[in-house]
Amino acid sequence: DNEANIMSGAMQLTNKYVKEVMTKIADVFMLGINRTLNYETMTEIMKHGYTRVPVFDSENNITYLLNTKDLALIDPDDCIPLSTVCKFYDHRPLYVDHDCKLDTILQEFLKGDSHMAVVQKLHNNGNHDPYFKTLGIVTLEDVLEEILQREIIDE
Ligand code: ADP
């Protein structure tokens, strides 16, 4: 039954990895920090409908999260740079290794700083300096779906 499912889902958190439940980077809607919050960009953001939009810098690193509610009072005619809004609110993502277990990331989310984490993998093949590759994003909802063992249908 339902409760037994939730129990077993919760117990599964210790042997499931972030990489198994993340949204792959190719499927993530994100924006470059050099964008302008004009009519075109604002329309694009609203059409996607996400609560949070990762923002990447010139080196393709996700350095900010844009909370779409922070756009409520912005006038597209003012053509405000996205960087201005990002720096003002300064929402930073969590960063997590792709081999992190779900119970660990759940603890991080429950601390409340951010409910979205950027999933990274460390590349270290000896030929050059080690670097992090971004594989995707994971949110609290992705972890909750594992506990409930079902999709959460969005409003
Ligand atoms: P929202 O509140 O925007 O619906 P949730 O945190 O509830 O976002 O996550 C719902 C699903 O959407 C999760 O699978 C999550 O990984 C994915 N998701 C969240 N934000 C984005 C985004 N900007 N681009 C692509 N997928 C996203």
Image (cartoon, rainbow, N blue to C red):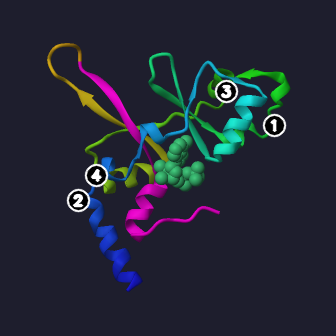
List the residue tagged with mark 3: 88
List the residue tagged with mark 4: 17
Give the alpha-carbon distance from disc 1 to disc 3, as whole Å: 14 Å
Query: Which numbered circle lies on residue 73?
Result: 1
Q: Is residue 91 left or right of residue 120?
A: right
| 153 vs 43: above or below | below
Q: Nearer the viewer, residue 85 or 39?
A: 39
First in sequence, mark 3 or 4: give its number: 4
Label 4 amino acid?
Answer: Tyr
Give the alpha-carbon distance from disc 1 to disc 2, as whole Å: 43 Å
First in sequence, mark 1 or 2: give its number: 2
Give the alpha-carbon distance from disc 2 to disc 3, as whole Å: 39 Å
Magenta span includes 134? yes
Q: Nearer the viewer, mark 3 or mark 4?
A: 4
Label 2 near ligand 1 (CB < 8 Å) = no
Residue most toward the left? 126
Q: Residue at x 81, y 29 (%)?
A: 76
Q: Are marks 4 and 2 in contact (CB under 8 Å)?
A: no
Tell me where residue 14 sits by quadrant.
bottom left
Q: Residue at x 47, y 65 (%)?
A: 151
List the residue tagged with mark 2: 15
Label 2 amino acid?
Answer: Asn
Dot 4 falls on a residue whose secondary structure is: loop
Dot 1 falls on a residue whose secondary structure is: loop
Q: Residue at x 67, y 27 (%)?
A: 88
| 155 vs 8: above or below | above
Give the alpha-carbon distance from disc 1 to disc 4, as whole Å: 39 Å
Dot 3 falls on a residue whose secondary structure is: helix
Give the alpha-carbon distance from disc 3 to disc 4, as whole Å: 34 Å
* Magenta residues (range): 130-155
Label 3 amino acid?
Answer: Phe
Percent across and percent down for residue 7 are 33, 76
